[in-house]
Image (cartoon, rainbow, N blue to C red):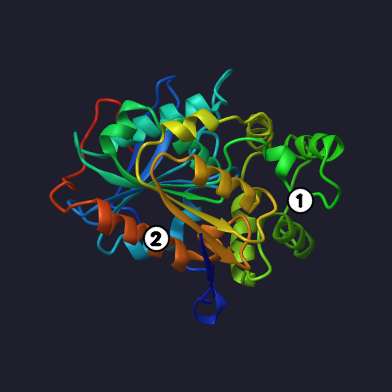
C-alpha cells in the first residue's frame, strides 16, 4: 500500500474555471431505454479513458481530469442515470445491474470494436465497474481500471459519518440518512461545512469544497434518495472477483463515507490488483480533492496498458443519437 501526501492547486484569483468543452456530445440508449448523456473530449485516435462519476455527482465532477487528459487522450465522461443531463429512470431503473448496462452501452457507442480504454470510477462509478466486471463490453474494451473511494458491500455498517460506536444502531441510522428525503437546499456556508465533514478531508481546498457542494446540491432529491436506498443494500463482492482487468485502487485517509477499510478489502479480493494508494488528508471526493494524484494514476495506467495502435477512432453505434 502506498500512502501519498497531496496538495491542491488554487485556480487563478480563486475563480471557478469554465467547464471543458467536449468535441462531441451524444445520447446513448441503454438496455432498458434509458437515455444516457455522454461527452467526448480530446483528439480522435488518442488513447482512451472512460470515467464514471459517483452518487449525487455529474460529468462536471471529472473536469480536472478532463482538462489535463484531453490534451493527449480521448476522454469519455457520462452522467449516470438520473444525474446531470441524464433523465431519471422509470420503475425498476435503480440498480447496479442497470448501471452496468449503461456502462456497456457507453463503451459500445464511443469505442471502436476491440478498442481498449482505461476505465475509471469514483464511488458509485467504481461500483458500476465492479457490477460490470464480467460484462462482455468491459472485457472487450477494458485495458485497466482505477477504483477511487468506493466499496463493494457493508457501506452502512462501515460508514464513519455518524460519530457513534459501530453496531446495529449506527448501521440503521446511516441507512436512514442515505435514504433521507430532506431537501439539501441552496449552497450556503453552513451546508458546505456539513458537506466537507461528510465527504471531504481536512486537506481539501475551500474552492474544491465549494465546487463539490454545487455539484451535489444539483442532484434531484428523488434521484439522491432512490440511489441512497440501493447503496444501503449494496453487495458487489462477487463483482470484485469478476473484475479480471489490472486494477489500481485509491482511497482518502479521511474518507467517512467509504473508509479505507473498503479499499483494503477490494484490493485483497481483486484477481489482478495493482495496489492501493491512500491519500493523506483527503476524504471521499478524491478526484476533486486530489486531482493531480488521480490524473497521474490514470496516465500511468494508460502508459502501461493502452497502445496507440489500440486507440482507434470513435465508433458510431446504432444505439446513439447526436445531441445538437
Residue 12 appears anywhere in the view: yes
Residue 35 appears anywhere in the view: no
Q: Is residue 5 above or below residue 295?
A: below
Q: Upstream in the sequence, badge 1 or badge 2? A: 1
Mark 1 lies on a secondary structure that is loop
Q: Position of residue 57 (x, y in %)?
A: 56, 47
Q: Is residue 320 above or below residue 66?
A: above
* Quadrant of the image containing the C terminus: top left
Q: Nearer the viewer, residue 52 or 172?
A: 172
Q: Position of residue 18 (x, y in %)?
A: 45, 64
Q: Quadrant of residue 83?
A: top right
Residue at left offset 54%, top offset 32%: 237
Give the tally of numbered discs.
Answer: 2
Disc 1 and disc 2 in contact, CB within 8 angstroms: no
Q: How far apart are labels 1 and 2 at the CA level? A: 27 Å
Mark 2 lies on a secondary structure that is helix
Residue 161 - label: 1
Answer few, some or many: residues within 10 Å of disc 1's Cα (few below 14, many 20 plus, some between 14 and 19): some
Horizontal side of 71 relative to 282 (left or right) equals left
Residue identified by numbered label 2: 297
Residue lying farthest to the bottom in this orientation: 13
Q: Nearer the viewer, residue 180 or 114?
A: 114
Q: Quadrant of residue 255?
A: bottom right
Q: Position of residue 213 (x, y in %)?
A: 65, 57
Amino acid at each position: 500500500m502506498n500512502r501519498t501526501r497531496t496538495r491542491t492547486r488554487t485556480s487563478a484569483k480563486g475563480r471557478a474555471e469554465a467547464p471543458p468543452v467536449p468535441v462531441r456530445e451524444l445520447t446513448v440508449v441503454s438496455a432498458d431505454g434509458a437515455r444516457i448523456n455522454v461527452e467526448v473530449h480530446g483528439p480522435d485516435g488518442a488513447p482512451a479513458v472512460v470515467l464514471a462519476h459517483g452518487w449525487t455527482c455529474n460529468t462536471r465532477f471529472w473536469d480536472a481530469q478532463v482538462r489535463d487528459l484531453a490534451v493527449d487522450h480521448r476522454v469519455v465522461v457520462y452522467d449516470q442515470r438520473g444525474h446531470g443531463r441524464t433523465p431519471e429512470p422509470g420503475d425498476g431503473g435503480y440498480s447496479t445491474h442497470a448501471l452496468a448496462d449503461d456502462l456497456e452501452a457507453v463503451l459500445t457507442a464511443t469505442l471502436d470494436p476491440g478498442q481498449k480504454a482505461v476505465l475509471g470510477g469514483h464511488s458509485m462509478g467504481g461500483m458500476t465497474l465492479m457490477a460490470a466486471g464480467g460484462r462482455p463490453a468491459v472485457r472487450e474494451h477494458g485495458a485497466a481500471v482505477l477504483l477511487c473511494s468506493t466499496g463493494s458491500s457493508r457501506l452502512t455498517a462501515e460508514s464513519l459519518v455518524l460519530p457513534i460506536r459501530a453496531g446495529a444502531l449506527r448501521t440503521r441510522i446511516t441507512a436512514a440518512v442515505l435514504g433521507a428525503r430532506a431537501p439539501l437546499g441552496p449552497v450556503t456556508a453552513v451546508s458546505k461545512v456539513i458537506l466537507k465533514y461528510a465527504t471531504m478531508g481536512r486537506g481539501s481546498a475551500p474552492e474544491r469544497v465549494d465546487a463539490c457542494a454545487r455539484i451535489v446540491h444539483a442532484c434531484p432529491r428523488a434521484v439522491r434518495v432512490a440511489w441512497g436506498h440501493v447503496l444501503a443494500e449494496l453487495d458487489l463482492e462477487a463483482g470484485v472477483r469478476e473484475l479480471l482487468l489490472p486494477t489500481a485502487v485509491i482511497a482518502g485517509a479521511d474518507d467517512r463515507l467509504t473508509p479505507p477499510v473498503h479499499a483494503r478489502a477490494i484490493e485483497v479480493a481483486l484477481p489482478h490488483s495493482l495496489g492501493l494508494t491512500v491519500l493523506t488528508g483527503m476524504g471521499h471526493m478524491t478526484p476533486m480533492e486530489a486531482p493531480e494524484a488521480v490524473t497521474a494514476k490514470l496516465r500511468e495506467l494508460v502508459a502501461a496498458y493502452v497502445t496507440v495502435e489500440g486507440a482507434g477512432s470513435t465508433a458510431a453505434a446504432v444505439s446513439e443519437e447526436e445531441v445538437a
